[in-house]
Amino acid sequence: MIKSSTRVSVIIPTYKREVKYLLRAINSVKNQTYKNTEIIVVDDNPPGSEYRKRMMDFMKQYTNDSDVIYYVNETNMGGALARNNGINVATGDFITFLDDDDEYLTKKVEKQLNFMIEKNCDMSFTDLKLVNDNKVVIDYREYPKLNSFDKQGLLKYHIMRHLTGTPTFMYKASKLKEIGGFEDVKMGQEFYLMLKSIENDLKICYFPECDVRAYRHNKGGISQGKNKIIGENELFEFKKKYFNIFTTREKMFIRFRHYAVMTMAYKRNKQYFRALKNVVIMFVSSPIDCIIEGRCFILRTLPKRERKK
């Protein structure tokens, strides 16, 4: 049972985003069935830029709203440190996140908070639906094969398949602050935060429902830029430090997944020769995973009612 005094802080970092998207994000929190929420908008736009000016003008409408905190970074710090600033000023008992162009469905906070309290977990994560600008599903992240929640089981599953993304995370505020929040990295901020949560022995629970709609736009965003390529290569090298805990078959999958991600990263950057090269390496790394994961991807993009049980 949730106590009415239990407060949830929702941290929304914003950077070079049209205000109409941020308005949608804020309204999706305002429209939650659970009302004791605190919205923290962290402005990470460059000082003096048009983006900063537009954002400051837009946020004036919340000046007298005690449930909305507008925090302005003195310099552009990046997503990880911007979120950490939000964590530092949060007053809620629980903390969750929302990107400035995404949205919660109306029962997201209530359902996940109830789950957290019922299971007495330090951190939880949910499924994630990725859609295009027309709200057509292009990917659906779920973890039906995650059966072990001890440290070793979570660690292996996370390194292989990534227990992310950020808008699905909810933490006890005290535990999140205790582990130090996000690492300052170019890519994979949510990956490293989950890894830190696992390695610090937090009680982590999986809530297999989806009340987050994450948008993947045709243009813009760090996931489509050069940072994606650099960051993914750095992440792959980092994962190799853990290879001693994996079987040969599991390492084949990790390599396959990396080159699959790199294929898409090069394609989005219109580096088609390198994309094709990574397709070849991906197939050589693990032909069987090319077949298995290709089928799984198709099934993930189908409406849930059309998927086989």
Image: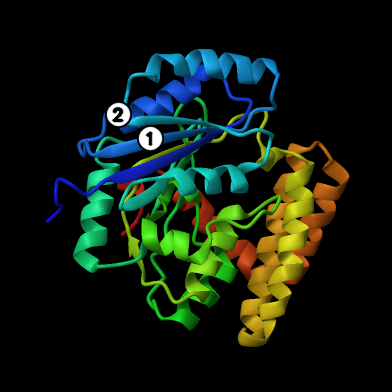
> In screen coordinates, is 3 left or right of 49?
left
Between 122 and 93, which is closer to the camera in this rendering?
Answer: 93
Three-letter amino acid code at the position of disc 1: Ile
Task: State the separation of the CA atoms marked 1 and 2.
Answer: 9 Å
Q: Is residue 47 above or below residue 137?
A: above
Give the position of the N terminus as an image quadrant: bottom left
Disc 1 and disc 2 in contact, CB within 8 angstroms: yes
Labelled disc at residue 179:
none
Residue drawn at the location 15% of the way across and 52% of the way down = 2
> Residue visible at 20% across and 54% down?
114
Height in image: 281 above or below 220? Answer: below
Q: Which mark is residue 39?
A: 1
Q: Tell me if I can see residue 197 in this picture.
A: yes
Q: Secondary structure at mark 1?
A: strand
Q: Position of residue 172 (x, y in %)?
A: 35, 59
Q: Tell me which amino acid carries mark 2.
A: Lys
Tell me: residue 46, above or below residue 301.
Answer: above
